[in-house]
Image (spheres, helix red, strand yellow):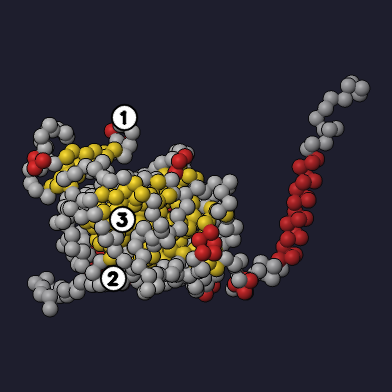
């Protein structure tokens, strides 16, 4: 029971414990920037050049590549940008490791159960458009009698462009039920943004470990090695991956919002240095290059960094921390206000891809229909529900599935809520989208879909909108009392107006009659 000396009682607020049922991360009342079951420590701050050491004093002072590194370590650099890129875009990391990545036993081909595609050009017969609205029921998790790790459980859905052109993107789903034991993955094509939907993941990278849960995202840059493992107690996991080529994920500019809002820089978490206890074990490092798998084999762990410093470092972000902004007076704000991260294109006015959040928030507006209006956006939109009811186009939209509307495809809401909203006389502030979270990947590009997405996954429901929904959206205009007479009056008024204006254009008006003179 609270106490008071001012005539009022302070009642302690019990912290919530389920991240999927909170309105915002602050409901957990945590003094740490991570959820209660996250076992790792992190360094906060977007855009920093972080540094970390397993053994204090390992990082060389005043230089990057000393002639003699402590503990006999090797210096290895990874550059993400061009050497001479402007300072704000220059990205690199120095690593101090037991053995350099060049110390391996060569490459080998591997067999895989994954479905990987990288060429999303019209000349590729393996990809095609989905002209209608499309929806996928939950993508199937692996069967109990098969062992599928991230390498084998990655499946391309759609994309645009080609990584060799250094511009474009691809969408994937992953469904796994086993760890990448003595196996690592490296994407040489682009940057991955991974969003967990089901199951907790224990992720190991060259720079340290991260814990990922549904409602969190993980970004790993091109050229960085990592392993996706199931967290303790997780039997299977599923999620979504967005890959960008020739671009990188950035925080969107805030413009008039000011210095704070949306995804705040301090909430992005970076790993601290970690080294494997057993280094001398056989390892397979699977490279994705030009959409094809090929593996490096070696007799030691790639997770042997004792220290590192730089800004090419994987990171994670908890979507429940998103500081949403929206209308507080009238009308529905464009969905771009919910952008978490963006990737630029060569067109300075149009992004290549935006990653958007739709979660719990207050809905406040006056004299306004507050659901999204019907629209034909120029962007391609892929939606996925992480948990809860989601924001799909039908009742079949479930967590673990997805839906798609291509550019200029007409879409909007047909639910009972849409009809009920038109009957609300007084609009009161309300909490919406509680106990759920939906993400959207939006792109200026036209998506071409793989055979796996169109038929192989077995969950696509590509049908036109059910005609019955139009029963909920009748033509009320044509039956409006007196509308025919009103339209006839408009027609008569326009004709009369035209006749009045045409009088002034009579060629006999305003000319001098020289014969009469």
Pointers 1 and 2 in contact (CB under 8 A)?
A: no
Q: CA distance from mark 1 to mark 2?
A: 45 Å
Q: Which residue is mark 2?
A: 234
Residue 178 screen position, x and y as percent: 31, 66
Res 467 label: none
Taking the view exactly as shown, the residue that stands out farthest to the bottom is: 1
Number of other residues with Cα within 10 Å of mark 1, as a class: few under 14, some 14 to 19, many 20 or more: few
Residue drawn at x 41%, y 41% is 246
Q: Which residue is mark 1?
A: 84
Q: Which residue is mark 3?
A: 218
Q: Would residue 126 appear left or right of 491 to someone viewing this image?
A: left
Mark 1 secondary-structure assignment: loop
Does the image show residue 334?
A: no
Mark 2 secondary-structure assignment: loop
Q: CA distance from mark 3 to mark 1?
A: 28 Å
Q: Would residue 392 appear left or right of 73 to someone viewing this image?
A: right
Q: Nearer the viewer, residue 384 or 479?
A: 384
Q: CA distance from mark 3 to mark 2?
A: 18 Å
Residue drawn at x 34%, y 46% is 107
Residue 136 screen position, x and y as percent: 49, 67
Please, is residue 479 above or below residue 346 in the view? below
Number of other residues with Cα within 10 Å of mark 3, as a class: few under 14, some 14 to 19, many 20 or more: many
Taking the view exactly as shown, the residue that stands out farthest to the right is: 515
Q: Would residue 235 appear left or right of 39 to someone viewing this image?
A: right
The mark that comes first in sequence, 3 or 2, is: 3
The mark that comes first in sequence, 3 or 1, is: 1
Q: Tell me the mark number nearer the camera, choosing from 1 and 2.
A: 2
Quarter holding the N terminus? bottom left
Q: Nearer the viewer, residue 133 or 17?
A: 133
Quarter holding the C terminus? top right
The mark that comes first in sequence, 1 or 2, is: 1
């Amino acid at each position: 029971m609270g106490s008071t000396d001012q005539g009022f009682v302070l009642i302690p607020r019990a912290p919530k414990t389920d991240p999927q049922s909170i309105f915002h991360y602050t409901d957990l009342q945590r003094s740490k920037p991570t959820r209660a079951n996250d076992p790792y420590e992190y360094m906060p701050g977007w855009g920093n050049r972080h540094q970390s050491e397993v053994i204090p004093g390992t990082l060389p002072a005043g230089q990057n590549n000393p002639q003699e590194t402590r503990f006999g370590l090797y210096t290895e650099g990874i550059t993400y940008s061009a050497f001479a890129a402007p300072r704000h875009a220059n990205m690199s990391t120095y690593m101090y490791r037991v053995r350099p990545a060049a110390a391996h036993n060569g490459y080998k081909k591997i067999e895989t159960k994954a479905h990987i595609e990288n060429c999303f050009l019209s000349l590729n017969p393996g990809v095609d458009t989905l002209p209608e609205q499309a929806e996928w029921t939950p993508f199937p998790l692996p069967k109990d009698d098969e062992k599928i790790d991230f390498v084998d459980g990655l499946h391309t859905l759609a994309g645009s462009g080609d990584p060799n052109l250094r511009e474009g993107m691809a969408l994937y789903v992953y469904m796994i039920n086993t760890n990448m034991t003595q196996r690592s993955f490296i994407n040489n094509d682009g940057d991955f943004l991974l969003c967990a939907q089901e199951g907790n993941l224990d992720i190991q990278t060259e720079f340290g470990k991260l814990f990922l849960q549904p409602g969190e995202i993980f970004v790993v840059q091109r050229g960085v090695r990592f392993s996706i493992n199931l967290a303790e107690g997780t039997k299977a996991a599923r999620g979504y991956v967005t890959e960008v080529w020739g671009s990188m994920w950035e925080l969107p500019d805030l413009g008039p919002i000011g210095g704070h809002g949306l995804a705040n820089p301090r909430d992005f978490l970076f790993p601290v240095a970690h080294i494997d206890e057993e280094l001398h074990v056989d390892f397979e490092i699977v490279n994705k290059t030009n959409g094809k798998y090929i593996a490096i084999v070696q007799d030691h762990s790639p997770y042997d960094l004792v220290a590192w410093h730089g800004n090419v470092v994987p990171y994670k972000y908890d979507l429940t921390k998103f500081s949403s902004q929206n209308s507080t007076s009238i009308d529905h704000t464009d969905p771009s206000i919910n952008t978490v991260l963006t990737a630029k294109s060569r067109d300075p006015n149009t992004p290549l891809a935006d990653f958007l959040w739709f979660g719990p928030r207050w809905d406040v507006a006056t004299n306004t229909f507050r659901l999204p209006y019907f629209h034909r956006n120029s962007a391609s939109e892929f939606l996925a529900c992480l948990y809860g009811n989601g924001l799909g186009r039908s009742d079949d939209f479930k967590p673990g599935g997805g839906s798609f509307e291509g550019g200029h495809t007409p879409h909007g809401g047909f639910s009972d809520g849409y009809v009920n909203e038109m009957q609300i006389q007084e609009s009161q502030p309300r909490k919406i989208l509680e106990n759920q979270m939906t993400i959207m990947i939006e792109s200026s590009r036209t998506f071409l879909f793989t055979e796996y997405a169109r038929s192989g996954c077995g969950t696509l429901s590509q049908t036109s909108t059910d005609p019955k929904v139009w029963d909920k959206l009748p033509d009320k205009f044509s039956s409006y009392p007196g509308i025919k007479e009103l339209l006839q009056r408009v027609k008569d008024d326009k004709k009369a107006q035209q006749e009045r204006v045409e009088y002034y254009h009579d060629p006999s008006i305003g000319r001098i009659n020289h014969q009469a003179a």
